[in-house]
Image (cartoon, rainbow, N blue to C red):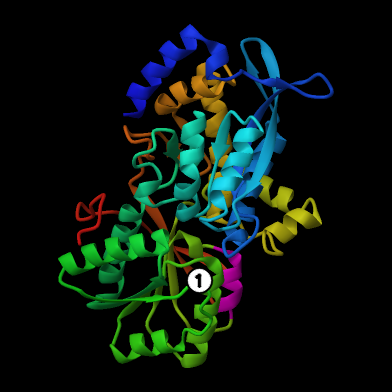
Amino acid sequence: MKKILAVLLTICMLLSLTACGGSGSGSASGEKVIKIGVFEPSSGDSASGGKKEILGMQYANSQTPEVTLGGETYKIELVYGDNGSSTDKAPSAASSLVSAGVSVVLGSYGSGVSIAGGPKFQEAGIPAIGVTCTNPNVTAGNDYYFRICFLDNFQADVLANFAMDKFSAKTAYCLGETGNEYDQGLIAFFKQVFEAAGGKVIADSFPTGNSDFGSYLNKAKSEGADVIFTPVSIAYAVQIIKQAASLGITAPFLGSDTLDDNMVLEAIKGTDLKLYVSTFYQEGGSPEFDEGIKKFINSSSENLAANGGNDTISAVTAMGYDAYYVALEAMKKAGSGDKAAIMKALPDVTYTGACGSIAFDSEGDAIRDTAYIKTANTADGTWALETVQKGSSTAETEPST
């Protein structure tokens, strides 16, 4: 579908470049500028992840602040739209980027805000490159949204199979936030795969703003759960982990990509809990990137604070870095900073970055078949690679009901 749209855009561009958007703007200093929108949460429950994703984009921009197109050099300017980790705030944040005249958008950390803001980009004809928004509905029905991450059906499939392979799990307890598309989508996919293999799933939801998870954790214990799957935001994950430690929970926790965060590591450090998370990158995967991003993080107190106070590399930072270069590759392929030209070029863009090879399928989703499973070292608060796991053929694009 996206490739069909790209053909139509070619016709549009030939008829009128002006009608389809400019190829760049000027700055006060006379430089030619192309604006990239950064659609991320800098506030709210997902701010920690959003700030780390932004760090990757900022580092990439510091390394490659310009792009040459048709013999002309353009400065790349990052324009920020804080979606506040909120589906209510996401549309206005998206509209602010449209008004700013961005040619392409990166983000967001968080599927719900990506789904909520996506129609604004579609209406404006601005392509968006999702970085770690894994819910299938981000790209479904929106020809202008692409993404470089794996999807939740794949991620849940990987984690369900890992639970059975690693722990011979027969009973899984799943806990997510009520109404959160990311949480609930992952739980539905996990349930589908786990039950298809003969397992039992007990699923509960907690209300937004909840801070007492004792009843849920005690239920998991009383039901004899072999694993506890909590695909929640960083803020909730920290609370759940701290309370689980005080309750003496012995069942291993499984977490989705959101739990790959140093705030989660800090919460679990010094406890007897076991935590395994699926993610996009493991430190050591690209030594050159690792060395550079650590220097960047430590180059200012602001960067260090955005990374949670230390230089542990989050997978979302590496993904943000790669997303920036995918946008530049689309510009180069298009030979233009025009939004319609970038949209036309994106379906055929390929790029090999810190997180591996990137290409898009017909829906604009990343072609990926591998996830990293990391475990928390509770002694020193670091991640250790447990395994690299592929999915099975059990997961579907839509969860069964």
Residue 291 screen position, x and y as percent: 66, 48
User: x, y percentage for residue 176?
Assistant: 40, 71
Look at mark 1 in the image and give the residue it sits on: 376
What is the quadrant of the N terminus in the image?
top left
Q: How many marks?
A: 1
Amino acid on which the number 1 mark rests in the picture: Ala
- Residue 339, quarter of the rendered image: top right
Q: In the figure, residue 249 lies in which quadrant?
A: bottom left
Horizontally, residue 401 falls left or right of residue 349, namely left
> Relative to residue 39, is residue 371 depicted above or below?
below
Q: Looking at the picture, how far across and down is residue 45, in whole percent? A: 58, 65
Pointer 1: residues within 10 angstroms few (<14), some, or many (20+)? many
Tell me if residue 184 is in the magenta stretch.
no
Q: Nearer the viewer, residue 232 or 82?
A: 82
Dividing the picture into quadrants, the one containing residue 98 is top right
Residue at point 28% right, 87% down?
Answer: 224
Query: Magenta part mainly helix, strand or loop?
Result: helix
Specify the segment rendered in magenta.
261-269
The quarter of the image holding the C terminus is bottom left
Asked whether 367 or 98 is in front, the reply is 98
Which residue is rendered at x = 68% and y = 37% of the image? Answer: 78
Q: Position of residue 385 (x, y in %)?
A: 46, 62
